[in-house]
Image: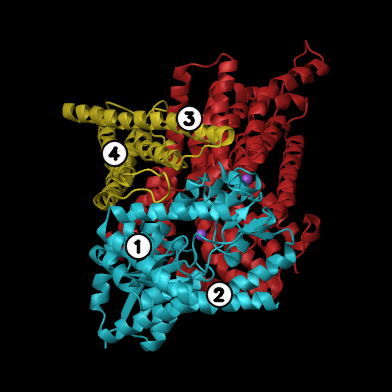
């Protein structure tokens, strides 16, 4: 029960505006010390150590570094505005470019903190400078940055493969279509939205002195260098030169090389970029450490047993089971880390699903879709915090909360489509 | 009568097959045999978040018991290396004989006692497979600069024949092997390897040599042990021993099942054995490394000697019994 | 009041020192990973020691970055109400947050982290992998060191809040680490 009260307390305390990471940590400290005693916190060094040795998370500082360098050297702006120009008079071009670039980044890293922050650094200032609606801008960045969870390679899929005993390759293959459909629907949403309310996403102003052809040609030319960088990052993974984590270092070094080519390089620039990187990385990891203290207190005070109890009460009929299971995961995802969900909840649901003859691959994809949504759901969605951490002060937390809602609805729609029409995604619901 | 609840931290995640079954069955037996006086509550790695912190946590008393593998602590206490499985060492049956009827248990206690711990055999995986390779190894040249995920002592032996042991986060192993970022992966055996899907991306599955009988470990904090009444100590001891032996049996069963399904569903997978020259070179390297390990430390020397002596004796009998029978069967079929 | 200002400036320097070390580690880490990729791919050379150095440096980046970001207000806040509040109200939030949350949290992590590192030191712990790095206690000791500096940065939040309350300083947007984008 303590765990549940703790969530309420954290929610109230967060509203006071003290840094999120230390609010989590501090609330955990009070509930933990009062119910279990100080010694509970002897586990903290081990938990911090496990973050330190989680080398996959190295992608966070490295991708952020790439993002900062691209931003400081104006190369990011060049990429996005050129892509926006390619869409010509189409409103929403920048947002669509953001989704596309985000999807590309997502294909290289599965670490949400890395892609959301990098996209936030790269594309938020550009969209704001072009008078985009704050909600549309932040919503599309969070949604695109979180795509990394479903677009392979992805950590959620690897963990689910492990928990459910499914080959990772099969999961990766099965996740491709849902990922593509999501990206497609995000773009369609942006198109429809901007058709209805063009003022939310003004089209890029056309240069009257140049023909459309010249415009396209110069845009294509400008896209090449930053796009080449993304190709290097992705290509190094596909060619086996680097692991997804290491590819982020190639991105960082590559961005510096681009800066040299474009005569934007100085040691000052690199040092200042490192400084920004450290600040943002610290913000992300402080949240991870605060959250691990929080989940420690939650589980050591018996929160995990309460959850198990609820799950065992799910109905024994197939459709009822699936719908309620998805609802439970969605709601828990508001509060609890996806790794916890994967490890605590999935092992309880899996045997039940298996006994009902449900195709586990399909079930896994449903869960993965659902868990990526959990990064985006207010008030505890980590993607929202991460983006807020790099957004200018005039972008309010509430803007981000409101901006993400349409994208969450799209995800729920796709989830429902996979449930009802699995064959559209190349899957079947049963064996 | 007092009831005791012991908290056990295991290195594995929740519901981890085979390894996790050993802890669960141990806890269930202890509770039943003690008529509920001895309860063991298991926390998996998702809860304590420190898979390789089990040793420290049990030592510090944050947990009463642990389930892990002794060789993980080699970086802390070098002599813990010897109680899991050694390259070119004993088979599971031979090693159990060494533990229970040779000097194994005593020597293990000699290593763990000064640390305030008791260590017991915790279940055997049986022989581990030599790993998944994307290219066939035809000669020792093929191993030069080969990038392989193989940790610990076996990695050191492998590096003596030119292999480059490489660290890859477990979550990225599959992608790394698929993209040829690394050339080979050593994991466990069919039952556990199947879960990671290596059979989909590598064709050559090599037979084992480096961990012929991987024995897991139950750790008990000495003070906690001392507090238990004699009958509960005995119940705990028997539960651990039975669960350990049962894990060996279950490993055989699950591996056989998994191998059958790999054979059927992935006809691309071929079983291979390293060329003899490779084994000979590795064997020599292994002897050299063992000698080095024994040279610096009296207790290490004693353990290595005990294992070598026991292996010699027990293998001579294995040769005329198990091996002779399997050879005969091979001829008949 | 004067000594509060002195103390505050001193604490700020400590946090900036952490930031300096973290920045250096950040650049070294990028170079380290890049070097490892190139030497593995181009020269087929793998050093587990160099691979372990990656996560050593990466740990320094965020463990020492956290106190630095505290001073520069880089940690994200939920600003539903916060931004509209007066400087005084903000100062009270920060002062009580630092005293109730940051400093006790840092104290617990620091004291247990100290035992954690000391244990590693007394055992002479090193890597268990071939060619891995020795002296594991050094990187483990970064946990209590980080906790110490988080505590001093927390104290810095207190001293800064007192300066704001006295009207000598204010929470400006410029001071905020937000808005990197
Ligand atoms: Na991904
Ligand atoms: Na193994």
Q: Chain of mark 4?
A: C
Question: Of the numbered discs in the image, which one, if any, rests on residue C119?
Answer: none
- Distance from Cα at disc 3 to Cα at disc 1: 42 Å
- Distance from Cα at disc 1 to Cα at disc 4: 47 Å
Q: Nearer the viewer, mark 2 or mark 3?
A: 2
- Distance from Cα at disc 2 to Cα at disc 4: 63 Å
Q: Residue at 63% across / 50% down in the picture?
A: B137
Callouts 2 and 4 close, C-beta under 8 Å: no
Q: Mark 1 or 2 closer to N-term?
A: 1
Callouts 1 and 4 close, C-beta under 8 Å: no
Question: Of the numbered discs in the image, which one, if any, rests on residue B304?
Answer: 1
Q: Position of residue B146 (x, y in %)?
A: 57, 44
Query: Is the CB–ligand 1 distance for label 4 below 8 Å?
Result: no
Q: Position of residue A350 (x, y in %)?
A: 61, 69
Mark 1 vs mark 2: tell me if same chain: yes
Question: Of the numbered discs in the image, which one, if any, rests on residue C149?
Answer: 4
Q: Position of residue A50 (x, y in %)?
A: 42, 51
Q: Residue at 41% across / 77% down in the picture?
A: B97
Colour mapping used in the image: by chain
* Callout 2: SS: helix
- Distance from Cα at disc 1 to Cα at disc 2: 24 Å
Q: Is residue B70 left or right of residue B14?
A: left
Is residue A70 something that shows in the picture?
no
Q: Residue at 54% across / 40% down in the picture?
A: A114
Mark 1 vs mark 4: tell me if same chain: no
Front-lying residue, B190 or A213: B190
Image quarter where ligand 1 lies: top right
* Callout 4: SS: helix
Mark 2 vs mark 3: tell me if same chain: no
* Callout 1: SS: helix
Picture quarter containing residue A123?
Answer: top right
């Amino acid at each position: 029960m303590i765990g549940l009260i703790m969530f309420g307390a954290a929610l109230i305390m967060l509203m006071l505006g003290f840094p999120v990471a230390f609010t989590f940590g501090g609330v955990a400290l009070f509930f933990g010390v009062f119910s279990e005693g100080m010694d509970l916190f002897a586990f903290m060094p081990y938990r911090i150590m496990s973050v330190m040795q989680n080398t996959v998370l190295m992608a966070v500082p490295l991708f952020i570094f790439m993002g900062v360098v691209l931003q400081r050297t104006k190369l990011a702006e060049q990429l996005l505005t050129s892509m926006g120009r390619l869409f010509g008079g189409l409103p929403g071009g920048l947002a669509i470019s953001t989704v596309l670039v985000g999807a590309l980044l997502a294909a290289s890293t599965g670490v949400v903190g890395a892609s959301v922050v990098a996209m936030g650094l790269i594309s938020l200032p550009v969209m704001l400078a072009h008078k985009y609606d704050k909600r549309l801008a932040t919503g599309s960045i969070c949604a695109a940055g979180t795509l990394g969870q479903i677009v392979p390679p992805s950590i959620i899929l690897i963990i689910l493969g492990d928990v459910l005993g499914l080959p990772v390759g099969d999961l990766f293959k099965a996740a491709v279509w849902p990922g593509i459909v999501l990206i497609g629907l995000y773009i369609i949403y942006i198109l429809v939205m901007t058709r209805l309310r063009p003022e939310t996403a003004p089209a890029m102003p056309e240069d009257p002195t140049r023909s459309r052809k010249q415009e396209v040609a110069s845009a294509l030319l400008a896209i090449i260098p930053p796009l080449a960088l993304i190709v290097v990052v992705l290509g190094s993974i596909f060619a086996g030169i680097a692991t997804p984590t290491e590819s982020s270092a190639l991105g960082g070094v590559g961005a510096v090389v681009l800066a040299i080519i474009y005569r934007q390089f100085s040691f000052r620039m690199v040092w200042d970029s490192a400084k920004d990187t450290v600040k943002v990385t610290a913000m992300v990891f402080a949240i991870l450490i605060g959250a691990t203290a929080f989940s420690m207190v939650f589980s050591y005070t018996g929160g995990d047993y309460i959850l198990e109890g609820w799950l065992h009460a799910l109905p024994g009929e197939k459709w009822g089971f699936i719908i309620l299971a998805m609802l439970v995961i969605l709601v828990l995802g508001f509060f609890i880390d996806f790794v916890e969900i994967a490890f605590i909840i999935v092992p309880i649901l899996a045997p039940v699903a298996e006994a009902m003859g449900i195709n586990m691959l399909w079930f896994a994809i449903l869960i993965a879709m659902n868990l990526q949504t959990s990064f985006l759901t207010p008030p505890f969605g980590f993607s929202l915090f991460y983006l807020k951490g790099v957004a200018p002060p005039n972008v309010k937390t509430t803007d981000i909360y409101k901006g993400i809602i349409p994208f969450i609805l799209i995800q729920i729609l796709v989830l429902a489509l996979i449930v009802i029409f699995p064959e559209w995604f190349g899957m079947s619901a049963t064996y | 009568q007092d009831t005791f609840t012991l908290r056990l931290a295991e290195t594995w995640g929740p519901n981890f097959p085979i390894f996790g079954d050993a802890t669960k069955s141990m806890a269930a037996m202890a509770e039943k045999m003690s008529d509920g006086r001895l309860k063991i509550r298991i926390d998996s790695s998702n809860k304590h978040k420190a898979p390789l912190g089990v040793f420290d946590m049990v030592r510090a008393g944050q947990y009463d018991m642990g389930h892990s593998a002794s060789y993980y602590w080699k970086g802390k206490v070098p002599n813990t290396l010897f109680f899991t499985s050694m390259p070119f060492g004993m088979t599971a049956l031979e090693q159990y004989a060494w533990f229970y009827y040779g000097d194994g248990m005593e020597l293990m206690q000699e290593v763990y006692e000064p640390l305030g711990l008791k260590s017991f055999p915790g279940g055997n995986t049986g022989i581990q497979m030599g790993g998944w390779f994307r290219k066939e190894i035809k000669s020792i040249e093929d191993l030069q600069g080969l990038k392989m995920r193989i940790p610990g002592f076996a990695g050191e032996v492998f590096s003596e024949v030119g292999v480059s042991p490489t660290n890859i986060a477990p979550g990225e192993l599959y992608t790394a092997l698929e993209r040829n970022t690394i050339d080979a992966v050593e994991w466990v055996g069919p039952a556990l390897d199947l879960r990671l899907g290596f059979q989909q991306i590598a064709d050559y599955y090599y037979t084992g040599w480096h961990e012929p009988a991987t024995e897991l470990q139950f750790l008990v904090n000495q003070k906690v042990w001392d507090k238990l009444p004699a009958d509960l100590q005995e119940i705990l001891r028997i539960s651990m021993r039975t669960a350990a032996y049962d894990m060996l049996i279950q490993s055989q069963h699950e591996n056989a099942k998994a191998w059958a399904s790999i054979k059927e569903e992935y006809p691309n997978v071929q079983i291979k054995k390293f060329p003899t020259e490779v084994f000979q070179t590795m064997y020599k390297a292994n002897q050299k490394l063992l000698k080095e390990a024994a040279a610096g430390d009296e207790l290490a020397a004693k353990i290595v000697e005990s294992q070598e002596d026991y292996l010699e004796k027990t293998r001579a009998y294995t040769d005329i019994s198990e091996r002779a029978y399997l050879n005969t069967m091979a001829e008949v079929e | 009041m004067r000594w509060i200002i002195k103390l505050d400036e001193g604490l700020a320097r400590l946090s900036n020192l952490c930031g300096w070390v973290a920045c250096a580690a950040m650049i070294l880490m990028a170079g380290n990973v890049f070097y490892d990729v190139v030497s593995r791919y181009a020269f087929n050379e793998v050093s587990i020691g160099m691979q372990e150095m990656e996560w050593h440096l990466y740990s320094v980046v965020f463990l020492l970055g956290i106190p630095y970001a505290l001073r520069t207000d880089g940690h994200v806040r939920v600003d539903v109400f916060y931004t509209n509040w007066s400087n005084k109200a903000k100062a009270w939030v920060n002062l009580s947050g630092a005293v109730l949350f940051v400093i006790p949290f840092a104290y617990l992590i620091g004291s247990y982290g100290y035992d954690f590192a000391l244990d590693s030191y007394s055992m002479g712990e090193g890597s268990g992998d071939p060619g891995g790095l020795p002296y594991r206690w050094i990187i483990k000791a970064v946990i209590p060191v980080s906790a110490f500096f988080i505590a001093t940065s927390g104290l810095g939040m207190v001293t800064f809040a007192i300066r704001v309350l006295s009207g000598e300083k204010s929470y400006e947007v410029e001071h905020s680490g937000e808005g990197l984008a």
